[in-house]
Amino acid sequence: MYRFLLTPRWWGINLFVVLAIPFCIFMGTWQLGRFEDRVQTHEAAENRPDPGTQTAKPLDDLLPVDTETSGRPATATGRYADQLLVPDRKLDDKTGFYVLNMLRTDSGKALPVVRGWLPGKPGSTTVPAAPTGEVTVTGALQASENAETTGVHAAGGLPEGQLGMISAATLVNLVPYDVYDAWVTLEDTGSDSTLRPVPAAAAQGTGLDLKAFQNLGYTGEWFVFAGFVLFMWFRLIRREAEAARDLALGLAADTDTGAGAGAGTGARADTSTDENADTGAGAGADTGAGAGADENAHAGRPGSGVTADSV
């Protein structure tokens, strides 16, 4: 009954099932692993000491920025150069902008330093001037922003002197010197009382955000796909087996024979009826016509003993 499984058509179905189920299980397991990694990273970040309580270290000792060094106090020495304003940044649910200055260090590279936050829009608020001469700054180390960072203007199109994304890839197009792939936000704005310190943001990937739960949802989807493939495979086998059993019992053949016999009988009945009708009609017509013609011929034939004159 199950010999149909060896046909070329079923070889293709079986091969698809054999490949699809392990693939779905692998993808589901991988997504589950991603979710577990995010949970572990989140727990490690919560158990880690507050970065602000740790001792400040030179900038070069903390690079590159990762989940361990993000938020750590970093120190750098240099001179302030170009100033840029970063619009549409929120602080305490109020919209304002960051004041960013490039700190030219002795290494030749420049470090983006966010000196603080001001309410309003760039151009409508007076910005305090940056300190002159050589300065040493201490601030929370942050990784370069990307298109997914909150408040970023990834599309560009900002006026001159404004910056949409704090990243080395963006700054190299605006300043004529090399830039560190990191930035710091000052915890102490010094004498600039109008500037408010910008708190350090948590490192990306260290929280149970929407992406973490998306990984968990994708895990369920892949396992459901594997179960659906297996269910459809068993259903197809069952349907094919039932069809083969009906054919073996002659149920499909009897149905075809009965249909053919009924059609043939009806056709023969119609043929007989048509033939009888044609025969009767032809015989009657011929008999009537012949009888009338013979009587007329005998009536007018000479020597019959009955003439018009005698009448």
Image: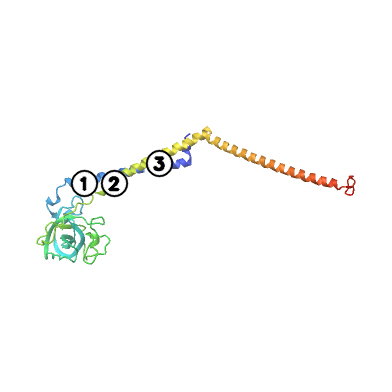
Measure how far apart labels 3 and 2 are at the Cα level. Answer: 25 Å
Residue 90, position as x, y percentages in the image: 19, 57
Q: Is residue 217 above or below residue 77?
A: above
Instruction: Identify residue for label 2.
Output: 215
Along the polypeptide, which appears first: circle 1 or circle 2? 1
Residue 211 numbered tag: none
Q: Are marks 1 and 2 in contact (CB under 8 Å)?
A: no
Secondary structure under badge 1?
helix
Residue lying at 36% horizontally and 41% vertically, measured from the top left: 226
Mark 1 neighbour class, 10 Å CA radius: few under 14, some 14 to 19, many 20 or more:
some
Query: Which amino acid type corresponds to the residue marked 1 in the rendered image?
Result: His
Instruction: Identify residue for label 1.
Output: 42
Measure how far apart labels 3 and 1 are at the Cα level. Answer: 38 Å
Residue lying at 40% horizontally and 41% vertically, measured from the top left: 17
Secondary structure under badge 3?
helix
Query: Which amino acid type corresponds to the residue marked 3 in the rendered image?
Result: Val
Give the mark count.
3
Mark 3 neighbour class, 10 Å CA radius: few under 14, some 14 to 19, many 20 or more:
some
Residue 40, position as x, y percentages in the image: 22, 44
Secondary structure under badge 2?
helix
Residue lying at 20% horizontally and 45% vertically, measured from the top left: 43
